[in-house]
Amino acid sequence: MSNVPVTVAAGFTPQEWALLAGPLRLKPASARDSRSIRVSALREEATCAELLQRLGPIIGAPNPAITASLLAKRLAFLTTGAGLYAMSAFDKGLSLAPDNCLIEYGHDGRLWTSSMPLHDLSPIGYAEGKRSAWRETLVRTLFAELLAPLWQSLTRVGKISPRILWENTAVRVYSLYERRMAEIESPSARQRCAEDFDWLLNRADPALFGLDHNPLQRFRRPLTQLNGREVRLRRTCCLYYKTTDRFEYCGTCPLLRTRKSPCPSR
């Protein structure tokens, strides 16, 4: 949290920790799964290639590109889920600096079992009047410092479009704010979540994502009618359907519109 006045926030309450450690899968690094590696290791081409080769058959992915996409979807859920929920719902920061995180990749052949292990789980607060700067630093650490280099590594090794990996990330953030945070009962917390989401979509500087554009804004499509319901179809396909015997599609897959068009991955 360099250059930002911070304070040590009050610890997470039992109710807050139950949510972070339960559905959002946060846990101490001391409890990490044996199927885990350092963030820096996944940035190394040889280690990344070895992991994709080992993980592919387990998750039913026929090639490294599909493995990279599905691994990125899981990592995006784990990192943005705990980090952004703590920031917006609880007004408490989590350090998602690369040297504080471990990457878990556990999968039982049907479902992901991986969690988000952190060495230091102490909540980070902010000095009075400094929430905006604190929020920027949390978001920069999460996206530009942690995820952007990982997506670059998976792009190189998996030979996959970075657009797919960034849209995998964006749809996780949309779901987090529009679905999970919609269940929050406190009016003040809901208002804070709405303000943070609006800022992430419309005002967050591209540099905070390590890019020349804001990916949350770029992949934000309007709702459209599909089979009697409103959905926000993706621009790219995450390739999940290629791991299923009967071509099962995600609920927001762009292929649902035609099913005959080639997957729009560029």
Image (tube, rainbow, N blue to C red):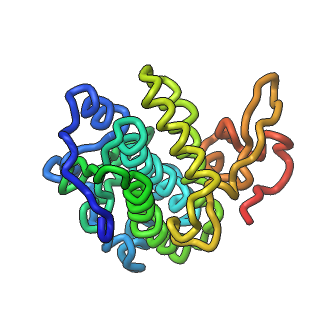
| Quarter in which the N terminus is drawn | bottom left
Estimate the x, y position of residue 72 in percent, counting from the top left: 49, 57
User: In the picture, residue 155 is in which quadrant?
Assistant: bottom right
Estimate the x, y position of residue 240 in percent, counting from the top left: 61, 48
Q: Residue at x 64, y 50 (%)?
A: 242
Give the side of residue 208 with respect to residue 174, left or right. left
User: In the picture, residue 264 is in which quadrant?
Assistant: bottom right
Seen in the picture, residue 207 relative to 20 is either above or below; the reply is below
Pick the front one: 257 or 259? 257
Give the side of residue 37 with respect to residue 64, left or right. left
Estimate the x, y position of residue 178 in percent, counting from the top left: 57, 34
Q: Can you name the residue that lies furthest to the left here?
A: 30
Q: Residue at x 41, y 60 (%)?
A: 133
Give the side of residue 77 with respect to residue 11, left or right. right
Q: Residue at x 26, y 29 (%)?
A: 18
Mark yes or no: residue 42 visible: yes
